[in-house]
């Protein structure tokens, strides 16, 4: 239990707890925001009231995630001043500016239009409401850009130099668009979108499996499926590009990802380990299950490597990433889930082409629906596993190759950090339980088909709403 007296380790644990918990919520809001833009756009184009009800239903889950995301995100940023003050002093001229851009450009844009998106139905013109929805989605995803740009700079720092212990920015554009930024932003953008799609698809499958509003939720499932046809394979391709970036810019992280202890020279082939049991003490893998020549094909699509691949022994023990096994298996969990999504998408497309996803037949696809329900939480696991690889793999550096984590932490009493860590653990547990409770209530209750559809004055104007779901003609105030 030595870590209980280690301020740096406790600060790392606290930041890991807050960031892992916080990541659960913006993952859904950034992707679901785009989905809301799509369904509201379909409603404006077709005037099919089902799409209107979809927009109203899924926006409830959106705002639940948004609220908890805000509540959990602010304490995470405060830690840069409390637990990581030396880091903030050293790189604040750049890092602080980027976080400021995220707050002023992205978060305020999303928050500013959120009220119109949630409460503007029947109060503002439909086109104005649609613009608000677009701005909310744009703001949420703009946050991804700024946060990933700042984090990517920590992975591949460029654009300035350290003078007397402080990073002086010489070229803001070079620092923002650092070598790993494009791949990182793209990979995270599609990760949030893919996760959201499979959550929406899983919830839709749950309704279909329980024979509740099957025709209604078959529409959302088909929208999701149409999007995943492109997104699921594309995410794997972008993930490969991200791995190439690590190969060229962060060799110690790649060595940890592959649990590779010995160097592989250029012109040689190397196996890829599906399973391994790394031993830090023995500096080798006690057990391995290898695919011959696999690493070359994964990194460069050919047998032999064109560049040398450094093994962990190339660095001193104190300069190697810790927890090799955690990094190794987190990467494989993330990748495995990505391929599972592709497989589920392909199977679903086949059934769709066979006519098995029609409203008359979709309830008979119980195994397929169970597959979508099973897939709903997997995107979260993949995202968290990816961030473990990204952040733990960067250690022992806070800014890769420039600032060690031990030098970036504030000098605080370990007891104080342990106390705040314990409080965060309790509060976040309560928040998580509340989120599950209110989320389950939203899902259990289902869509409200009694809402007044803007522009619909008569029953016969409704395109597809079943007779039992004729909109309530009372004023909005009375309905509430």
Image: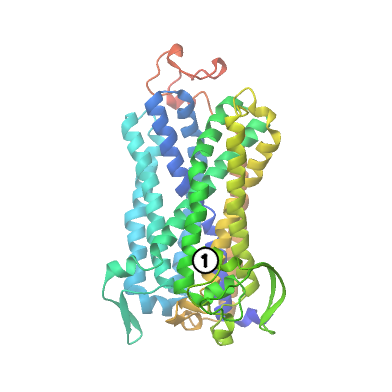
Q: Is residue 70 above or below residue 88?
A: above
Q: Which residue occupies 62% across, 82% down?
A: 5
Residue 155 shows in the view? yes
Q: Which residue occupies 56% across, 69% down?
A: 14
Q: Which residue occupies 37% across, 78% down?
A: 89
The coloring applied to the image is: rainbow
Query: Residue 381: image x %, image y %?
Result: 60, 56
- Tell me the quarter of the image containing the N terminus: bottom right
- Left or right position of 223 against 208: left
Query: Residue 347: image x %, image y %?
Result: 62, 40
Q: Is residue 339 above or below residue 88?
A: above
Label 1: which secondary element:
helix
Query: Residue 54: image x %, image y %?
Result: 49, 32
Q: Which residue occupies 44% across, 81% down?
A: 401
Q: Nearer the viewer, residue 27 or 331?
A: 331
What is the residue that sits farthest to the right in this orientation? 287
Q: Residues within 10 Å of mark 1 (few under 14, many from 20)?
A: some
What is the residue that sits farthest to the left in this orientation? 170
Residue 204 shows in the view? no
Query: Residue 308: image x %, image y %?
Result: 50, 78
- Left or right position of 291 against 246: right
Number of marks in the image?
A: 1
Residue 74 found in image quarter: bottom left
Q: Is residue 120 above or below residue 379?
A: above
Q: Nearer the viewer, residue 295 or 462?
A: 295
Residue at mark 1: 299
């Amino acid at each position: 239990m030595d870590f209980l007296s280690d301020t740096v380790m406790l600060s790392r644990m606290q930041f890991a707890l807050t960031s892992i918990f916080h990541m659960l919520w913006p993952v859904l809001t950034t992707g679901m925001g785009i989905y809301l833009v799509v369904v509201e756009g379909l409603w404006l184009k077709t005037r099919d009231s089902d799409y209107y009800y979809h927009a109203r239903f899924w926006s409830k889950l959106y705002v639940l995630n948004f609220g908890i995301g805000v509540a959990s995100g602010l304490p995470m940023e405060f830690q840069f001043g409390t637990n990581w003050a030396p880091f903030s002093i050293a790189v604040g001229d750049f890092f602080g500016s980027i976080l400021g851009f995220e707050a002023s450009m992205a978060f305020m844009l999303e928050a500013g239009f959120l009220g119109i998106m949630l409460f503007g139905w029947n109060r503002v013109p439909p086109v104005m409401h649609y613009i608000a929805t677009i701005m909310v989605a744009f703001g949420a995803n703009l946050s991804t850009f700024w946060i990933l740009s700042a984090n990517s700079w920590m992975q591949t720092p460029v654009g300035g130099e350290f003078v007397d212990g402080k990073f002086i920015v010489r070229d803001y554009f070079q620092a923002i668009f650092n070598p790993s930024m494009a791949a990182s932003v793209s990979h995270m953008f599609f990760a949030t979108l893919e996760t959201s799609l499979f959550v929406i698809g899983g919830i839709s499958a749950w309704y279909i499996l329980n024979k509740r509003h099957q025709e209604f939720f078959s529409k959302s499932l088909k929208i999701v499926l149409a999007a995943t046809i492109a997104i699921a394979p594309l995410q794997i391709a972008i993930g490969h590009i991200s791995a190439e970036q690590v190969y060229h810019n962060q060799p110690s992280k790649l060595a940890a990802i592959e649990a590779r202890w010995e160097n592989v020279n250029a012109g040689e082939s190397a196996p890829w380990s599906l399973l391994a049991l790394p031993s830090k003490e023995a500096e080798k893998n006690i057990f391995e299950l290898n695919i011959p020549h696999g690493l070359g094909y994964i990194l460069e699509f050919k047998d032999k490597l064109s560049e040398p691949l450094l093994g962990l022994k190339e660095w001193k023990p104190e300069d190697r990433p810790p927890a090799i096994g955690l990094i190794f298996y987190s990467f494989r969990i993330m990748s495995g889930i990505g391929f599972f999504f592709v497989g589920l998408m392909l199977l679903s497309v086949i059934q769709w082409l066979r006519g098995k996803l029609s409203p008359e037949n979709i309830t008979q696809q119980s195994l397929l629906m169970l597959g979508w329900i099973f897939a709903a939480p997997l995107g979260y696991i993949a995202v968290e596993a990816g961030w473990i690889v990204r952040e733990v793999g960067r250690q022992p550096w806070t800014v890769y190759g420039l600032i060690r984590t031990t030098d970036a932490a504030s000098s605080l009493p370990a007891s104080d950090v342990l106390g705040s860590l314990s409080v965060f653990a309790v509060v976040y547990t309560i928040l998580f339980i509340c989120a599950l409770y209110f989320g389950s209530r939203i899902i259990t209750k289902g869509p409200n088909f009694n809402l007044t559809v803007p522009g619909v004055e008569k029953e016969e104007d409704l395109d597809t709403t079943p007779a039992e779901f004729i909109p309530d003609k009372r004023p909005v105030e009375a309905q509430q």
